[in-house]
Amino acid sequence: MESYYNCLSVKADNLLWLLQDKALEITGEAIEEVKDGFIIRTEKDIEPIKSQLIAYAQELETIMSESINMEFSEQTLKNQDWIANYRDSITPIVCGKYYIHPSWFEDKNHKINVIIDPALAFGSGHHASTFGCLKALGIVETEIQSLNGKKVLDVGCGSGILSICAKKSGACVWACDTDEVAVDSTKENAQKNSVALENIFLGSLNVIPEAKETFDIVMANILADIIVALPLQSFVKKGGYLILSGILDKYIPKVLDKFKNFKIVSQEIKQEWATLVLQK
């Protein structure tokens, strides 16, 4: 351990969660969430990290047609066990029958325990969109009585939290992401939870032979514009379900228009993030 470390504080007025996920992807290290921003602590040079965050914010502005104002402050501080301090700040979450917790917490009896270490993956269940998907998975399970043996596709799997929850509920799960770091993270977390997903691959729907593979449930916790652009409906069996999240509430009409031939099963908004359950 070096005697000193670099500290980069980032403030943003829009799409903060996406910038946090990107920071985790870039650094592979813990970040601390603070009001309207986050803090990166690393022994690495922070200038390349800062440059990548700025470039990513510019990409988001183009994709989302929204502006992002960012502020940075930098410090060099004496090293301490800040990862341990960060771990102390993380709390488990309960969503229905699922108990999502870091590896340093004990399992909870009578719950499906899922281990996700926030410092190592971008998706711990705390964000409103991920929590909404977990809740939606429970809604679909109630509709069909059981996930046992059902075929599930997780598009944009991130840390693999949704895939692992579905697998632990008895489903046959395929997971994909266009980010290699996310695919590796899903594989690591699946192993950590002692489950084997049926298929984990790098890429998007174009990798799947559309005419041959359809699913009982397709989950996509990604941006609204990407949801609209992808042919998700083609991969849902007749009578099957779509779980869609990562949607700011103002984009709900746009998404529903894309899937106007689907029945709306549920629509919930948490902290301006919408989660939709649709049936084909």
Image: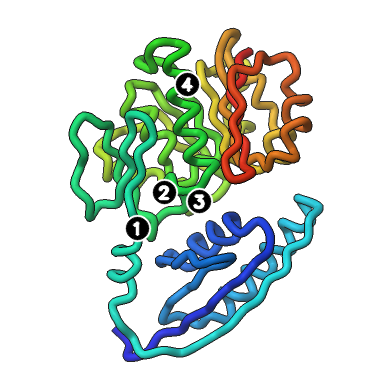
Mark with earlier residue (2, 4)? 2
Q: Residue at x 68, y 15 (%)?
A: 262
Q: Which residue is mark 2?
A: 124
The reply to whether dot 1 and dot 4 touch (C-beta < 8 Å) is: no
Q: Are marks 1 and 3 in contact (CB under 8 Å)?
A: no
Would residue 101 be found to the left or right of residue 64 on screen? Answer: left
**Discs 1/3, front:** 1
The residue that disc 1 covers is 90
**4 and 3 marks in contact (CB < 8 Å):** no
Query: Callout 3, which amino acid?
Result: Glu
Question: Mark 3 or mark 4, which is nearer the start of the sequence?
Answer: 4
- Relative to 100, is 196 above or below? above
- Mark 3 closeness class: few <14, some 14–19, many ≥20 residues within 10 Å: some
Give SS at disc 3.
helix
Q: Are the residues at dot 1 and dot 2 in contact (C-beta closer than 8 Å)? A: yes
Rendered-image quadrant of the C terminus: top right
Within 10 Å of the Cα at label 1, are there few (<14), some (14-19), or many (20+) other Cα atoms?
A: some
- Kindly identify which residue carries mark 3: 180
| SS for callout 1 | loop
Question: Where residue 217 sits in the image (x, y, percent)?
Answer: 51, 21
Q: Nearest the camera: 79 or 33? A: 33
Alpha carbon separation for disc pair 1 and 2: 10 Å
Answer with the quarter of the image where residue 222 lies: top right
Residue 201 seen by the camera: yes
Determine the residue positioned at 81% across, 52% down: 65
